[in-house]
Image (cartoon, grey):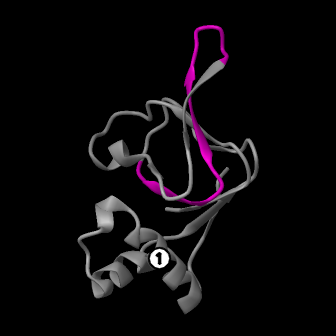
Amino acid sequence: MVTTKAPSSTRMSKAIIDLLINVPMFDSLKADELKIVAKHMNFIDLTKNEILFREGETGDYVCFVVEGSLDVLKAKGSGEYVVLATLPKGRSIGEMAGIDDFPRSATVRARDKATLVI
């Protein structure tokens, strides 16, 4: 199970804002607006090969890669997975969860140790 850590200091809030500045979804926000968004975000740490979410699960959050990278996987009929994409620092995953009520369309796994903002 993925655990989150709430930002507990100004330094963490600044780290979130620094990340969000480079995400196209947030590039039109002003500094004070980014501070408001940052207050509602948490960190997630994943170990190598740890699953963030599985294909078919209900989604209710979006994540941004702060460190490390994630593999987006699709199940094959044989029970094996195919890597559809690898997401590096600055990329987002799970956006469709905020748009529709469909289940997750792929499994996401940490390619290496990763830190995300949710």
Q: Position of residue 20 (x, y in %)?
A: 41, 70
- Residue 9 makes an appearance in the image: no
Looking at the rendering, the stretch of residues picked out in magenta corresponds to: 60-80
Q: How many numbered circles does the render carry? A: 1
Residue 25, placed above or below residue 31? above
The residue that mark 1 highlights is 18
Taking the spot 36% from the left edge, 75% from the top edge, the residue there is: 37
Amino acid at the residue labelled 1: Asp
SS class, disc 1: helix
Residue 62 is left or right of residue 5, and the answer is left
Taking the spot 52% from the left edge, 30% from the top edge, the residue there is: 55
Taking the spot 60% from the left edge, 45% from the top edge, the residue there is: 70
- Residue 10 makes an appearance in the image: yes
Q: Confirm whether the magenta stretch covers residue 66.
A: yes
Front residue (pair 108, 22): 22
Judged from this view, the residue extending furthest toward the left is: 28
Q: Position of residue 8 (x, y in %)?
A: 59, 85
Residue 39 is left or right of residue 117, and the answer is left
Taking the spot 63% from the left edge, 21% from the top edge, the residue there is: 81
Q: Position of residue 78 (x, y in %)?
A: 65, 8
- Label 1 crowding class (10 Å Cα cut-off): few <14, some 14-19, many 20+? some
Q: Position of residue 103 (x, y in %)?
A: 41, 33
Residue 19, placed above or below residue 97? below
Residue 69 is left or right of residue 42, and the answer is right
Residue 31, placed above or below residue 23? below
